[in-house]
Amino acid sequence: MTNAVKEKNTVIVNPVDKYPKPEFPEQEQELPGTEDKMDPRPDHGEASYKGSGKLTGRKAIITGADSGIGKAVAIAFAREGADVLISYLNEHEDAKDTAAYIEKEGRKAILLPGDISSEEQCKQIIERAVQEFGQIDILVNNAAFQVSHESLQDISAEEWEQTFKVNIHAMFYLCKAAEPYLKPGSAVVNTTSVNAYTPRPTLMAYTATKAAIQNFTSTLAQLWAEKGIRVNCVAPGPIWTPLIPASFSGKETAQFGSSSPMKRPGQPAELAPVYVLLASPESSYMSGATVPVTGGMPTI
Ligand code: NAD
Ligand code: MG
């Protein structure tokens, strides 16, 4: 094929028009939310992600891999050749669906439900991965908890603590338990948020944990640099996942992402390539970094 013909066949998609824009139907869910109740359904790259052997033979743990961003990352990792342990709270149907995509690639999927706010659960995740895979090469700390409130007075101490436990304490428990197994060349990828830069006042506890995650990433990257273990984080903007109808009002959900410069929310599929990059040896000099995927929302 000549270059001219190749060029003619290349479809260049305008990112603004790639996915639906709000108005979405008004919808609400209870936390943690599930994918099957979402309208429109999110895109996790099921039909589009193409692997090229970037993670062949790698063994990965992904928290919150049942749905949303974690699911897209799990599908992409499997297509790049990795086996995946799927940690999730209790959304069994979503988790089984993710596992089916991993197995379709001939890779191994392990389902592990449970609340990662307990150190015991986090230790079990690491032990199970070592038992089943014999090694851990990639740890993606992606699960999170958020509840929206108009007033500080509406946030209970219990909810404040639970937000910190799930979002940042679990990251510490998992990294600590994984360290003895992480060899040079391993990678940790944490999910922070655009809220670390421009905090939404109705998500006060959550945004504080997201800023902490960035700081944690930066310190751990330095602590582990000489061991050859890289630690980075991804800062998503508004992304269409079950977390959204489960934590915002029907009206907010219907307009979700409309105030971003691209006037639409991102889809989980648009995040996965960045996690693949950060997990793969191709990003060998990247550590301590935050990569924003925000549709143009400012992060400075
Ligand atoms: P999601 O609901 O699909 O994924 C979050 C997952 O966390 C859930 O599937 C759930 O199983 C898991 N989880 C929650 N509480 C848990 C607990 N106590 N124990 C174990 N697992 C638990 O939503 P998502 O948007 O894909 O979220 C993934 C990450 O992306 C989160 O860190 C979130 O903060 C971040 N993020 C999302 C957005 C967005 O707009 N969706 C924006 C910025 C950052
Ligand atoms: Mg879920």
Image (tube, rainbow, N blue to C red):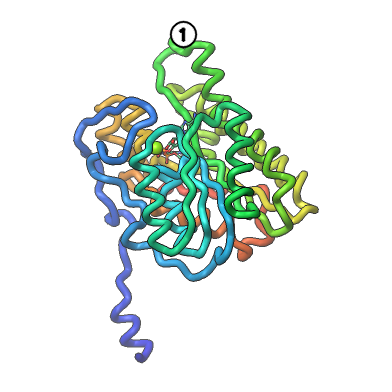
Residue reaching furthest to the top: 153
Please give the name of the residue rendered at 34% of the width and 62% of the height, measured from the top-left corner.
48
Q: Is residue 7 above or below residue 177?
A: below
Q: Is residue 259 visible?
A: no
Q: Quadrant of residue 239?
A: top left
Q: Position of residue 136 (x, y in %)?
A: 63, 52
Instruction: Name the residue at 36% across, 52% down.
Output: 44
x then y, percent, for residue 126: 62, 42
Provide residue 12's location: percent of width, then percent of height.
Answer: 32, 68
Question: Residue drawn 70% across and 38% down?
Answer: 176
Residue lying at the far bottom of the rendered structure: 2
Q: Identify which residue, 232 or 237, lies in the foreground.
A: 232
The answer to whether residue 40 is above or below residue 146 is: below
Q: Quadrant of ligand 2?
A: top left
For the N terminus, the quadrant is: bottom left
Q: Position of residue 268 (x, y in %)?
A: 39, 48
Left or right of 94? Residue 65 is right
Of residues 51 and 291, the one drawn nearer to the viewer in this rendering: 51
Q: Quadrant of residue 146?
A: top left
**Where, by quadrant of the figure, is residue 102 drawn?**
bottom left
Q: Is residue 272 visible?
A: yes
Amino acid beneath label 1: Gln
On screen, residue 133 versus residue 27, left or right, reads right
Q: Residue at x 41, y 43 (%)?
A: 66
Q: Quadrant of the C terminus?
A: top right
Check disc 1 and report its element: helix, strand or loop. Answer: helix
Q: What residue is shown with label 1?
A: 153
